[in-house]
Amino acid sequence: MKKVVLIATLVVKDGNNEGVLEALTALHKATHQEDKGCLQYDVHKDNESENTYVFVETWESEALLAEHMEKAHFTAYKAFMGDKVERLSLQKLTKIL
């Protein structure tokens, strides 16, 4: 199986940051504790943009990443974020070197 690297960039709408750090923290903790195949799950804050967060994830397989996206902690996070999200981009990568 090929490992999958995911870069997810999340931009929160202006004025909608309340509770976001807590939601990200809960998602990060639950993912590390509960998700099989999670090799890396780091959340970063953009130094240039107050409302931008970047996830750097590595998964053992595409299937295990898909399972993560169906877990209760991930769906709860998505429900909380709801209309707070201005933009979300996902970039799936395969390490070659």
Image (tube, rainbow, N blue to C red):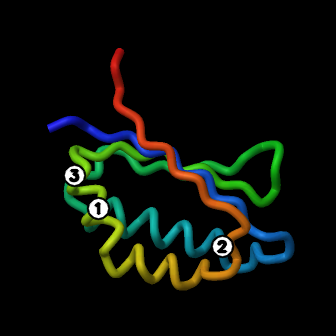
> Residue 18, percent across and down?
74, 79
Establish if 54 lies above or below 28: above
Report the residue marked by disc 3: 37
The reply to whether callout 3 and callout 1 are in contact (CB within 8 Å) is no
Q: Residue at x 26, y 67 (%)?
A: 34
Distance of mark 3 from mark 1, alpha carbons? 11 Å
| First along the sequence among labels 3 and 1 | 3
**Callout 3 amino acid:** Gly
Q: Nearer the viewer, residue 92 or 25?
A: 92
Q: Nearer the viewer, residue 86 or 77?
A: 86
Establish if 90 lies above or below 22: above
**Residue 50's quadrant in the figure?**
bottom right
For the N terminus, give its image quadrant. top left
Report the residue marked by disc 2: 20
Q: Residue at x 45, y 83 (%)?
A: 76
Report the residue marked by disc 1: 66
Dot 3 alpha-carbon crowd within 10 angstroms: few under 14, some 14 to 19, many 20 or more: some
Q: Residue at x 64, y 58 (%)?
A: 10
**Callout 2 amino acid:** Val
Is label 3 in a helix, a strand or a loop? Answer: loop
**Callout 1 amino acid:** Ala
